[in-house]
Amino acid sequence: MKLEALLFDVDGTLADTERDGHRVAFNQAFAEAGLDWEWSVDLYEQLLAVTGGKERILHYLDNYNTEFERPQQLKEFIVDLHKSKTRHYTDLLNTGAIPLRPGVLRLLKEARQAGLRLAIATTTTPANVSGLLKNTLGEAGESWFEVIAAGDIVPAKKPAPDIYTYAMEQMNLPAEACIAFEDSENGILASHGANLKTIITVNGYTLGHDFSGAVIVLDSFGEPDQPFNVIAGDAFNKTYLDIELVKQLHEKSN
């Protein structure tokens, strides 16, 4: 089936948001709340095994900070912490501190010029997505994407496939007409669960993940003057990911 749409994860895929974005914002929120919690780079790598910020805080309390005296209204406490974290994260985005990864802007522009449809499928909150797109693509950045499926719009987050299934339902497209872009093992479990062919672009946190079944695994999308490294798969002698290569990868895996 002909390729019609590109479905993108956000954190780690479009931008390296985790280590110097979300992690920093979590720590700022903790400090603001008077908590002595500090999520180091190494600890955050372990916490990334759980998707969703609120879920990650609970996982931290359940497994890494079991001596913390929990407030009676734990759910509300976590929700408030996460709201604070989102505010700090969007402040970071507004400073321009978190750019798109190499090749992302070029690929998005190529896709639009080729008449391909674009969507977001992510566990991060809508405000985080909006902030990133506006600060990297401009005020009209969100309009580039036909569907922005984000956060709690579905009950089960990645590695469940629900967010991808939701996005495709909104676009009225079958999985065979789409391809997903991910950076993590939880991400590819979600995309594969939705029967999507998947292109992987790793980052420092996900280099060692299991990407079995990906159509290709790259270290970045690359640029004409900044070639990618192929970790697994066939790039058909290309040195950067363009729409022609995306279509080849989609057709090859049919």
Image: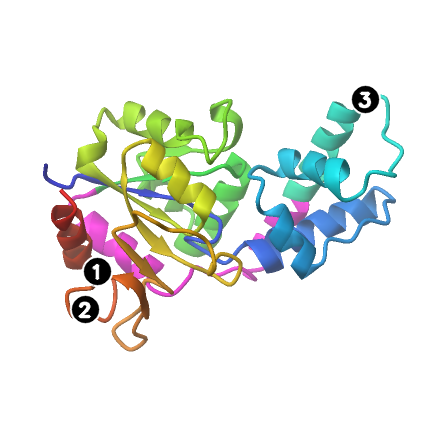
Question: What span is colored magenta in the figure?
Answer: 87-116
Q: Which quadrant of the structure image shows residue 67? A: top right
The disc, 2 or 3, on the residue closer to the chain's N-terminal end is 3
In screen coordinates, is 104 left or right of 203? left
In screen coordinates, is 165 left or right of 55? left
In screen coordinates, is 167 left or right of 247? right
Q: Residues within 10 Å of mark 2 (few under 14, many from 20)?
A: some
Q: Residue at x 63, y 51 (%)?
A: 46
Front of the two marks 1 and 2: 2
Q: Which quadrant of the structure image shows residue 149? A: top left
Question: In the rendered image, which residue does mark 2 sit on?
Answer: 238
The alpha-carbon separation of the residues under discs 2 and 3 comes to: 54 Å
Q: Secondary structure at mark 2?
A: loop
Judging depth in this view, the residue of 147 and 62 nearest the camera is 62
Q: Residues within 10 Å of mark 1 (few under 14, many from 20)?
A: many
Q: Please, what is the three-letter code of the amino acid marked with disc 3?
A: Gln
Labels 2 & 3 near each other (Cβ < 8 A)? no
Labels 1 & 2 near each other (Cβ < 8 A)? yes
Q: Residue at x 44, y 47 (%)?
A: 185
Question: In the rendered image, which residue does mark 1 sit on?
Answer: 242
Asked whether residue 2 appears in the rendered view, the answer is: yes
Q: Secondary structure at mark 3?
A: loop
Q: Is residue 114 magenta?
A: yes
- Dividing the image into 4 quarters, which one contains the C terminus? top left
Judging depth in this view, the residue of 73 and 185 nearest the camera is 185
Q: Residues within 10 Å of mark 3 (few under 14, many from 20)?
A: few
Q: Main secondary structure of the magenta part?
A: helix
In screen coordinates, is 189 left or right of 245? right
Question: In the rendered image, which residue does mark 3 sit on?
Answer: 73
Q: Which quadrant of the structure image shows residue 238? A: bottom left
Judging depth in this view, the residue of 58 and 99 nearest the camera is 58
Residue 24, compared with residue 121, is above or below; it is below
